[in-house]
Image: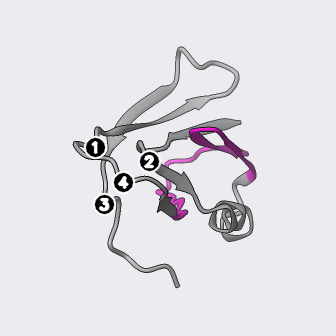
Amino acid sequence: MAIIEVKMLSGYIPDMKSVKRLKSANPVVQRTEVKTNEVIIYLEELSRETNKFVFRVKEEIPVKNLKPAMVKIYDYYNERADNAVIEYTAPCSKEEET
């Protein structure tokens, strides 16, 4: 099992409907969880294939000088051995969801 933790950018909140759609849109997603300032995605497994996990966020409060937020992926059973961290900024994507 692997876990993806997506911290929210300051002033942004996740769109709950799009987070819930992750499970039906991607067979490796076991479940999703939304906490105060992050989205957690639980995956059955990881492979060498590229996967795309897309959900929408909404700007709730405008924030000046927005700092990057962190995305972390790790092996649930051995977090220290297998993990990766990357930052993202706004706008995350201009791509429209279909």
Q: Residue at x 70, y 22 (%)?
A: 77
Is label 4 in contact with label 2 (beta carbons under 8 Å)?
yes
Q: Which residue is mark 3?
A: 91
Label for residue 66?
1
Q: Which amino acid does the dot numbered 3 rest on? A: Pro
Label for residue 62?
4
In terms of depth relative to the viewer, which is nearer, 97 or 63?
63
Judged by depth in the image, the label closer to the viewer, 3 or 4, is: 4
Element under disc 1: loop
Which mark is first along the chain, 4 or 3? 4
Is label 1 in contact with label 4 (beta carbons under 8 Å)?
no
Q: Which residue is mark 2?
A: 11
Residue 79 left/right relative to 12: right
Element under disc 2: loop
Q: CA distance from mark 2 to mark 3?
A: 13 Å
**Quarter where residue 70 is shown:** top left
Element under disc 4: loop
The spot of residue 7 in percent (x, y) is 50, 39
